[in-house]
Amino acid sequence: MIAATRFSVLDRSRTRAGQDGAAALRDTVALAREVEALGYHRFWVSEHHGVPGVAGSAPTVLAAAVAAATSAIRVGTGGVMLPNHRPLVVAEQFGVLEALFPGRIDMGLGRSVGFTDGVRRALGVGADEADGFAGALTELLGWFTGGQRAYPGVRARPAEGLRVPPFLLATGEGAGIAARLGLPLVVGDLRGRAKAVAAIERYRAEFRPSAWAKEPYVVVAGTVAVAADERAAARLLVPEAWAMAYARTRGDFPPLEPAERIEAAPMSGRQRELYEAGLRGHVHGAEERVAEQLERAIAETGADEVLVTTSTYDRAALLDSHRRLARVAGLTGAAGAAA
């Protein structure tokens, strides 16, 4: 089952302790080259605004840098948050990307708005902006097909007539929108918990074929950490688990710290609780164990593709994890990279 499943990578351009945003962005571009050599199917970047530990704030700009630095891997966004942007501008940006890198660009789209009141005000959007997502998405797709009717005489150049595959990052109502519009669906729950499985089942049941996709296509995203043994793989999860615990107790999302520094640091009771929760529920372990977990997760979700979103401090260990996962998945290029 794993061999029939595509594997891809999403990188959020997380900063590391002692590193600035420019270094994090350069690391993202370098990682794209490395996972391309391993045979991964696509490489996506994300959109986060005003988050101290994340440098990826302009996904289409970063996607252009990634596409320019690679030659074959598909490049896209996971995703552009459509409520933050005018659909015409998004269409123009992806039209430029597709014109420059034909046949390699994906348009991953999400419904989220800024995560704080201050960020939302700075973006000029309200907390309820996502309520108009379906209409904005329909308009966006219309700029590519020439079918938008809201602005007579206006055409999106160079987007109109180009085919940039759209993917919808969503659960719940978003999965229903993806089904009605006939779009591929991305769900952020690799372990196949009940809510994610229900969203996927609804999506498949309600899917309507479209010019964008003739049948349902499900991408399931999540953390996958692979190392020589269980303990080493578990330690790859430590920096992100601590960052999330810190953010939820301090209101500030920090850069990634080394695992040994975190394990030696004092934590409040609440931080310890959140930190330990953050270590659970991920696919991790040595290669054989990860293969078993992935087989089960793919069977539970029926995923057509797995999008790996792992973040950790040790960049060499992260690349080794991707290399080991490529071997587990039987990706082209993995054997050569392991030599």
Image (cartoon, helix red, strand yellow):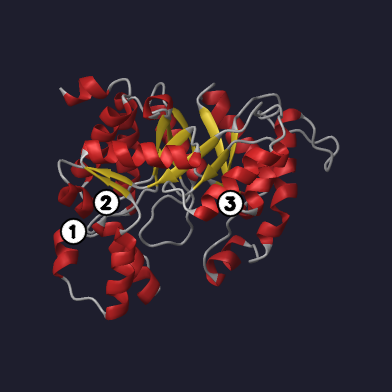
Residue 78 visible at all: yes
Can you tell which mark lies on residue 133? Answer: none
Numbered circle sitting on residue 259:
1
Between label 3 and label 2, give the one nearer the viewer.
3
Other residues around mark 2 within 10 Å, as few (<14) / some (14–19) / many (≥20): many
On the rendered structure, is 255 left or right of 140? left
Cα separation between marks 1 and 3? 32 Å
Going by the numbered disc 1, the residue's amino acid type is Ala
Instruction: Name the spot of residue 40 as percent of width and height, x first.
Output: 37, 28
Verify CB contact (< 8 Å) between mark 1 and mark 2.
yes
In the image, what residue occupies the spot 26% across and 28% down? 327
Q: CA distance from mark 3 to mark 2?
A: 26 Å
Q: Position of residue 23 (x, y in %)?
A: 29, 47
Circles 3 and 2, Cβ within 8 Å, touching? The answer is no
Does label 3 or label 2 sit earlier along the sequence? 3
**Crowding near the residue tagged with mark 1, few <14, some 14–19, many ≥20 C-alpha atoms within 10 Å:** some
Residue 181 placed where, x, y %?
A: 71, 38
Closer to the camera in the image, 118 or 130: 130
For the point 54% across and 21% down, the residue is: 103
Please state which of residues 84 and 198 is positioned toward the viewer in this rendering: 198
Q: Secondary structure at mark 2?
A: loop
Number of labels in the image equals 3
Q: Position of residue 275 (x, y in %)?
A: 29, 67
Q: Quadrant of residue 246?
A: bottom left
Query: Pointer 2: what residue?
Result: 312
* Image-based side of 212 in relation to 2, left or right: right
Depth check: give the residue in front, 298 or 66.
298
Amino acid type of the residue tagged 3 in the rendering: Thr
Please report whichever mark, 1 or 3, sits nearer to the chain's N-terminal start.
3
**Depicted 240 relative to depicted 290: above or below:** below
Residue at mark 3: 171
Cα separation between marks 1 and 2: 9 Å
